[in-house]
């Protein structure tokens, strides 16, 4: 046990200083937060710049109504009008286009003479990516034209607006208040946790794989095996990198919970954190044993990556099916896939984040995962002991099976 702790300590202290670990642990979540939060803040912030919009009115009367609605409905942070509207006559479309080309105006709306029947207008702008601005002009034009159509049919638009008021639809989970339930969060939070589990497991497992390959290629493993046994070396590496993975996972959780608390969002309970850690630990042990065995078989990383790519494809399946699992956490397919050991950690994290499975399913999936980890560690240990000192010859599948039987 002493040798295992020494190897684990060396692996942990060595890898924690690597640039890959530091970047993936601290920079990666900050980038994710930046890409997800900053755009939404920019989209929802109050506008501070006035826009000049042109209206080429071929009807002779709708342009003025659109102008009034734009100037009354949308304001700047200072309280001033956001939109300044320039009216153009029918024959002045080219003038509006030239003003847009010279950036005098930000865009112009063309209203055809038969707009009531054609139900189509055209908006020209250089900033197609300004979804907020385009949406405001679209909403305004749609409201004015719809009201004009009602008036022509002798329908009171105010009565229609009153009857068409949207029902305030609240979605709640049993036992939770409106502040604790969020429909979008219930979808994205489990997916985010699965992605965290995916990156943490595969980063540490890939480090384990490269560590074994590196020590084999420079024959450092021969020196190490003169002081420790093959089993102690493998278990020490797995333990050290497992602690590294837990540290990385803890950093992810702290950053995620801190940001969500700042935004006033409800993400995860203490019970869910416990289950998350349980499935992470067993998931990590399962994959690390597989990667340690792969690293001991091959002489170079290129050949090993061909095999690990297959494992990557397997773990992508839960991510691909995440939408189905989140919408159907108790479906037969979801439950069956939860009992496949290489997918159990991912599917159970998804299900726990959406709707807590039954106690029976949690216990049985955990037992299946534990048994699979023990068997995989035993098999990986036999392969590791025999293959770690083999050079120049890649073992065949019959040879690997014979090692396992022996």
Image: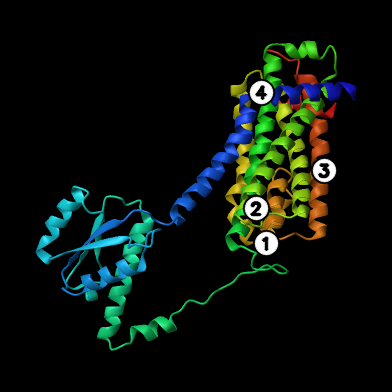
The one nearer the camera, 95 or 328, is: 95
Q: Return the x and y of residue 224 as percentages of the image width and height.
A: 80, 14
Q: Find residue 210 and name its label.
A: 4
- Residue 285 lies, with reference to residue 195, above or below; the image says above
Q: Return the x and y of residue 216 as percentages of the image width and height.
A: 70, 16
Residue at screen point 82% across, 20% down: 230
Q: Find residue 331 and name its label.
A: 1
Marks 2 and 1, Cα distance to the nearest angstrom?
32 Å
The one nearer the camera, 74 or 33, is: 74
Marks 3 and 2, Cα distance to the nearest angstrom?
34 Å
The residue most toward the right is 1
Disc 1 element: loop
State which mark lies toward you, 4 or 3: 4
The one nearer the camera, 53 or 285, is: 53
State which mark lies toward you, 3 or 2: 2
Q: Find residue 261 and name its label.
A: 2
* Picture quarter with the C terminus: top right
State which mark lies toward you, 4 or 2: 2
Are there few (<14), some (14-19), or many (20+) residues within 10 Å of tag 4?
some
Taking 227 as reference, is 149 left or right? left
Per the image, the residue denoted by label 3 is: 370
């Amino acid at each position: 046990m002493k040798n295992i702790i020494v190897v684990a300590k060396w692996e942990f202290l060595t890898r924690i200083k690597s640039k890959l670990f530091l970047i993936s642990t601290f920079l990666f979540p900050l980038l994710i937060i930046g890409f997800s939060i900053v755009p939404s803040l920019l989209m929802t912030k109050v506008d501070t710049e006035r826009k000049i919009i042109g209206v080429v009115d071929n009807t002779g009367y709708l342009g003025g109504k659109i102008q009034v609605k734009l100037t009354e409905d949308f304001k700047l942070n200072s309280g001033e009008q956001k939109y300044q509207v320039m009216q153009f006559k029918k024959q002045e479309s080219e003038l509006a286009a030239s003003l847009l080309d010279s950036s005098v105006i930000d865009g112009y709306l063309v209203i055809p003479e038969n707009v009531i029947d054609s139900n189509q207008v055209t908006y020209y702008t250089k900033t197609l990516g300004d979804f907020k601005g385009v949406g405001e002009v679209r909403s305004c034009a749609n409201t004015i034209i719809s009201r004009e159509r009602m008036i022509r049919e002798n329908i009171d638009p105010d009565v229609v607006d009153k009857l068409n008021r949207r029902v305030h639809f609240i979605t709640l989970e049993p036992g939770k208040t409106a502040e604790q339930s969020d429909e979008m969060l219930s979808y994205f939070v489990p997916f985010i946790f699965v992605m965290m589990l995916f990156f943490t497991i595969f980063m540490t497992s890939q480090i384990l794989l490269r560590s074994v390959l590196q020590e084999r290629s420079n024959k450092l493993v021969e020196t190490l095996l003169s002081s420790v046994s093959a089993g102690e070396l493998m278990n020490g590496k797995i333990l050290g990198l497992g602690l590294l993975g837990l540290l990385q996972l803890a950093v992810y959780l702290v950053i995620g919970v801190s940001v969500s608390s700042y935004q006033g969002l409800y993400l995860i309970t203490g019970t869910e954190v416990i289950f998350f850690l349980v499935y992470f630990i067993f998931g990590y042990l399962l994959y690390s044993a597989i990667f340690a065995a792969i690293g001991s078989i091959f002489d170079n990383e290129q050949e090993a990556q061909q095999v690990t790519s297959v494992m990557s494809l397997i773990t992508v399946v839960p991510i691909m099916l995440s939408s189905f699992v989140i919408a159907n956490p108790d479906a037969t397919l979801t439950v069956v896939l939860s009992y496949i050991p290489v997918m159990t950690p991912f599917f159970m994290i998804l299900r726990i984040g959406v709707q807590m499975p039954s106690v029976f399913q949690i216990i049985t999936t955990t037992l299946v995962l534990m048994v699979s980890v023990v068997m995989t560690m035993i098999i990986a240990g036999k392969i590791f002991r025999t293959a770690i000192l083999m050079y120049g010859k890649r073992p065949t599948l019959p040879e690997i099976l014979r090692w396992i039987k022996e």
